[in-house]
Image (cartoon, helix red, strand yellow):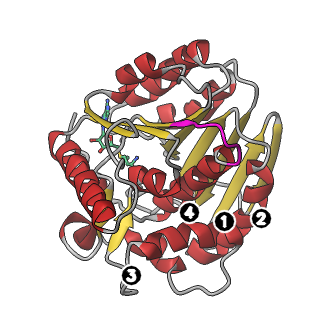
Amino acid sequence: MLSYRHAFHAGNHADVLKHLVLIQLLRYLGQKEAPYMYIDTHSGAGVYALDTGYAAKSTEYLTGISRLWDRKDLPGPVAEYVGLVKAMNPDGKMRYYPGSPYCGEKVLRSQDRMRLFELHPSDSKLLEDNFRKLEAHAAANGQRSNVRGKRVMIQKGDGFAGLKALLPPPSRRGLVLIDPPYEVKEDYRRVKDTLSDALTRFATGTYAVWYPVLQRMESRELAGKLKRLPANGWLNVTLSISGPAPDGFGLHSSGMFVLNPPWTLEPMLREVMPYLVSALGTDAEAGFTLETGETVTTSGAPKRR
Ligand code: SAM
């Protein structure tokens, strides 16, 4: 099913959580000189306009990046994420929002590699176009001439299936982001099956899965299934900006599930999640959950899920 367009959701509260965690995971890998590979199985278009088109119509960014834009009290990791978004809006107006490939492009070093998959014909073309523009911009500024080429490869195709051939990466260091639309319940099963297979090929890799927190059974069961995968450890963080809408529509809560998380991730999230709840929360049911291993920590009111 190819009706999903991420532009509708660009910069919303779920993107804030996902991209904040993504940037920190990449930063951690970059602490060592040795190269790493970032694989994005569901890349989207890479860059989104907020002031025109789908995003301007849905205005979902008002639930996310917009609420952080003018804050002067951002904790370090949140400031780094907002700083990355601001750097692509040099005139100070919030016009563009980065997708996960763009976050990767900004954080990766010249020795690192990025592999991007996108199935939708329109978004894969936009992704290609956006990276071509980045390359031209870098060349015009005398910066890295290798935005594309060996460093960044874009494939129009199925990221679940394409991942197999890339594991393990030659450097044996890497992060895989799996961020499907979940419009079909098949996506939940494929996330688990793909991770199960990936761990047999690259057991020490870090795997980050974004997921919507919804009433549907597949959503409620996903984290429990991922916890049983044979990884060295896991971290599960969710952010709810409110209780569910009375009509049941709209996404108010989402999560990031990380297999083999770096040890730094949990303390970082303990610091920033209360801040995100207060900055993005819209009612008394706003809150977060943060679990690692068997330990469960919750803040805010219990969730009705
Ligand atoms: N990761 C992106 C970001 O954070 O900016 C957003 C990705 S969006 C949630 C999911 C994307 O996956 C959509 O652009 C959709 O077209 C694409 N998609 C759906 N099924 C796919 C598949 N099997 N393989 C690769 N891409 C797929």
Q: Residues within 10 Å of mark 2 (few under 14, many from 20)?
A: few
Front of the two marks 4 and 2:
2
Bounds of the magenta segment: 31-37
Give percent across and percent down for residue 118.
Answer: 29, 38
Say which residue label 1 marks: 77
- The answer to the question of whether label 1 and label 2 lie on touching residues, with beta carbons closer than 8 A, is yes
Majority SS type along the magenta span: loop
Q: CA gap, disc 4 to disc 2?
A: 23 Å
Q: Is mark 4 within 8 Å of ligand 1?
A: no
Residue type at mark 1 is: Pro
Identify the residue at image location x=44%, y=74%.
Answer: 87
Q: CA gap, disc 2 to disc 3?
A: 28 Å
* Local SS, label 3: loop
Kindly indicate the quadrant of the structure image that contains residue 251: bottom left
Say which residue label 3 marks: 90
User: Which of disc 3 and disc 1 is earlier in sequence?
Assistant: 1
Is residue 190 visible from the viewing direction of this image? yes
Give percent across and percent down for residue 98.
Answer: 39, 61
